[in-house]
Structures are given as structure tokens and as C-alpha cells.
Image (cartoon, helix red, strand yellow):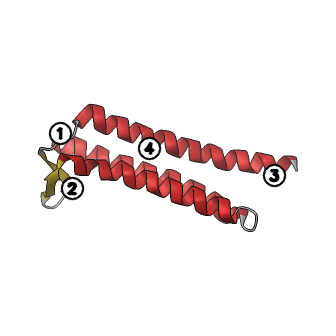
Amino acid sequence: MMKTNWHFKKIYLVYVFACLFNISIWLWLWFYIRPVGNSLPLHYNIYFGIDEIGNGYELYFLPLLGLIIILFNLLLGSLIEQTNRLATRYLAWLSLVCQLGLGLALFLLIINYF
């Protein structure tokens, strides 16, 4: 019984780190770029440079996608945690890795354009 509770605490701790990283992406986007209705680059390619320009509000889709990934993995993990604990761990770590990837994408866009 004690081991089960510790298992759940470790999984939810990974989700907490993923959520904190997602919040930092939101704040970084808001304070550093301040996307508004103006046209801003949305995607940067190392071969062609800026290859997608759109409304500044569309930059918020990046952290929104991360939040959707966290919520989907948390819901799916809570549904299967009694039958498959390994998959629950993978979903938690996948949420964190996705947040790191989205943060890296935003960082590369910032250093190459802003």
C-alpha cells in the first residue's frame, strides 16, 4: 500500500513539473514577445528562414497545444493507472518531454527573429 502511494506521487510530480514548464512558456511568450494582432513569424526553418507568418495571437497555440497534451495524458493515465502502471509513467514523462520540445521551439523562434 505504501509503495502504491509513492508511485502515484512520483507520477503526479512529473505532471506538476510539466505544468510548471507550460506556465513558464505562457509567461515567456507573454512577457518577451507580447503577441498582439500584428503579423509575426510563426515558424522558422533553418533552410528558408521564416516560412510562416500569421496573426500574433496564433503564437499562443504553441503553449495551448502543450496544455492539451498534458490534460489528455493525465486523463488517459488516470483511466489506465490500475491496469498498466508502466504506460502511466510513460504518459507522464511524455507530457514533460513535449513541454520541453515546445519550449525549445519557442526559444529557437525567439533567438532567430526577435
Density class for disc 1 (Cα within 10 Å; few <14, some 14-19, many ≥20) is few
Q: CA distance from mark 4 to mark 2?
A: 19 Å
Vertical placement of 34 versus 97: above or below?
above
The nearer-to-camera label among 1 and 4 is 4
Density class for disc 2 (Cα within 10 Å; few <14, some 14-19, many ≥20) is some
Vertical placement of 23 versus 84: above or below?
above
Q: Which residue is mark 1?
A: 114
Q: Secondary structure at mark 1?
A: loop
Q: Hey, what amino acid is under mark 1?
A: Phe
In the rendered structure, the answer to whether residue 83 lies left or right of residue 29 reads right
Q: Please give the name of the residue rendered at 23% of the width and 41% of the height, measured from the top-left corner.
A: 111
Q: Which mark is residue 22?
A: 4
Query: Residue at the bottom extreme?
Result: 83
Density class for disc 4 (Cα within 10 Å; few <14, some 14-19, many ≥20) is many
Q: CA distance from mark 3 to mark 4?
A: 27 Å
Q: Which residue is mark 3?
A: 4
Q: Which residue is mark 2?
A: 43
Q: Secondary structure at mark 3?
A: helix
Q: Hey, what amino acid is under mark 2?
A: His
Q: Where does the C terminus fall, quadrant-wise?
A: top left
Among the two numbered marks 4 and 2 on one chain, the one whose residue lies closer to the N terminus: 4
Among the two numbered marks 3 and 2 on one chain, the one whose residue lies closer to the N terminus: 3
